[in-house]
Amino acid sequence: MGYTDTISMSLFEKIWRKHLVVERSTGPALLYIDRHLIHEGSFHAFSALRERGLSLRNPTQIFGVADHYVPTISRHPKDASTPEITEMITRFETNMQWSGAHYFPIHDARQGIIHVMGPEQGITLPGMTLTCSDSHTSTHGAFGALAFGIGQSESTHVLATQSLWQAKPLNMRVELKGARQAGVTGKDIILAVIAHIGSSGATGHAIEFTGPGLSTLSLEDRLTMCNMTIEAGARFGIMAPDDLVFEYLHGRPFAPKQRDWDRALIQWRQLYSDPDCGWDKEITIDLGALAPMVTWGTSPEAALPITGMIPNPAQEPNTTLRQSMIDALEYMALTPGTPLNTVQIDRIFIGSCTNARLSDLRSAAHILKGCRSKVPGIVVPGSMQVKKAAEKEGLDQIFKDAGLEWREPGCSMCVGVNGDTAPAGERIASTSNRNFVGRQGPGVKTHLMSPAMVAAAAISGHLTDVRPLLSRIS
Amino acid sequence: MTPFTTLNGLAAPLDGRNVDTDQIIPARFLKKRRGEYANYLFYDLRFDAEQRPREDFVLNQAAFQGANVLVCDENFGCGSSREAAVYAMVDFGIKSILAPSFGDIFYNNCLKNGVLPIVLPATTLKALRLELTQAAAKKIPAKNTPASEHHDGLNITIDLKGCTVACDYFKQPLHFEIDTFWQECLMKGVDEIALTLGYSDQIQQYEQKARENQPWLAP
């Protein structure tokens, strides 16, 4: 059951074909799902299972972790922002015990945001199909997995049958060439890609990142990039796994061991796109031409280099695009022509499945060391393991000394469902993934950027280019 | 799932690209139970900070009371996978959504809940939204008139079997594409889990082979 075949295939196609249970001449196929991840939002799926008298087909292939609704001020469900949320966390616990699936409760040393702790535990493995009822499941594609977000009905289907009817997406290649400058991170690269192709530029597609630039990126940069392919419309982001991935996975709790490891490695080394596989859509990004990015509007596509200015809708010839720019600027209370690096902020957020891994915290702490933040803000590590490692390095102290709050892991202010939101009208520099209207609270204005850029904004009190600070520090 | 065959509906125009699922249902309302979401559909667009209906929002306008079809713009339902965005549509009474493109997860979620997502060209839908807006300005239907009895230019007829959309502004019914699998599922109200359980033998065979090749699959 190898991946090689006589015809040329993309990495995506290889994994897709290997997981076909029932194929039809057109439309969706029944795809086997190797691993499925669930969180507290799964209560609809469990209600549906119970109503029908169904149980989990394969509990050992299901992994549950409380991340969306958990409080970040403590590890006690009773400290949730409302009694309704406390009940939700408790209900998740009951459902998980009923299910027999792997469970990582709020106080577990392995708990974390599902897309951070999944890779940490070796749950995410190359060549696998992996689903989660969360749109940022594309994150796991950085390991060469076919990973995608689904809704609760589809989640119920996976729990009951370990499979899913899916239409095969088209294939899009994003070729990365050139060498990036200091201060340009995975976040800046993916924001540049989204700005380039638009927020529906990859709808109906799976994005594979390829090219010489890929091997220069850290695993954490890669995770950040795959995480945000959904913001360009692609449910799947994927990258061919290399030694960096294999070394990371070796010895992880749920990764194969000993002889299985050797066997897995042989299979995983076949996970790449054949050179002449063909693509439905292709773009090339010159990493050398990129600067740190920030968003100015209410969609991640509204991103520009920090050296730019708030764009002028009057210069947009397309009336539909012009209107969406006008609406976005009205919500964001920004004036065309304003230099981005003069936009004052009220608060910062460092966290989320996009940017709350150890290297993210290190890069923010590097900028903040010995400085005070001019605005309040919270730092929410992506997992208990990240938190522990960061504390061992003293990063927590740097954040606290800067006047920021050091919290417990969870999705927190990225989605705000646990009650971590900002007061209405505030402007936030955020490492999260969505700057949608009201995402961080009603009337709250979100600017997306890298952790280092958020740190730079914190000590400046306004959006600013982190690069001069990097050279000053070094 | 309620089968979807034909619909003679009342269409409401909803402008704006990238209407994300956070707009369709803000995150703070996701904890509700099925059937309780109607009030929260487009909550922050429908209501102001004091919970008063915003007069400028299309679904608050008299002409569009009872609307069960939305005519939208590009990338409708992008963003979060929250299925409550579709639960809110269902609970509110929306049966079909027309847009030039949809967020992929939202599109799938519609199919699982008996809501028909229809892809039509952006220019066609832009013109239709304008016509609907103008028709509504001209004619306000009598209060409590059932949606099916409106004859004021806001009607829209959808035939899933023939894959057509008809209304006063189209010279002839427009054809739309939907995969035959989903078409049949919607028309028959197919229970997908029951359908898949019919393939249990194939799943079993697949699993056996997969576990031989990857003993680490199910830890």
Image (cartoon, coloured by chain):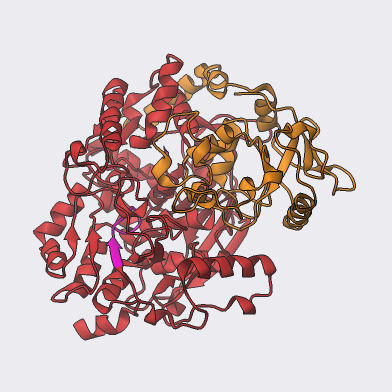
Residue occupying the point 52% across, 55% down: A207
Where A98 falls versus B151 (above or below)?
above
Where B100 falls versus A370 (above or below)?
above
Task: From the rendered image, report the letter of the chain displayed in red.
Answer: A
Magenta region, residue range:
A347-355
Percent position (x, y) of residue A149? 46, 43
Percent position (x, y) of residue B218? 33, 29
Percent position (x, y) of residue B179? 69, 36
Taking the magenta stretch, the answer to whether it contains residue A227 is no
The answer to whether A460 appears left or right of A435 in the picture is: left
The answer to whether A401 appears left or right of A35 in the picture is: left
Q: Nearer the viewer, residue A22 or A292?
A: A292
Residue occupying the point 19% across, 50% down: A408
Percent position (x, y) of residue A242? 36, 55
Where A402 falls versus B138 (above or below)?
below
Where A414 falls versus A124 (above or below)?
below
Task: From the rendered image, report the letter of the chain displayed in orange.
Answer: B
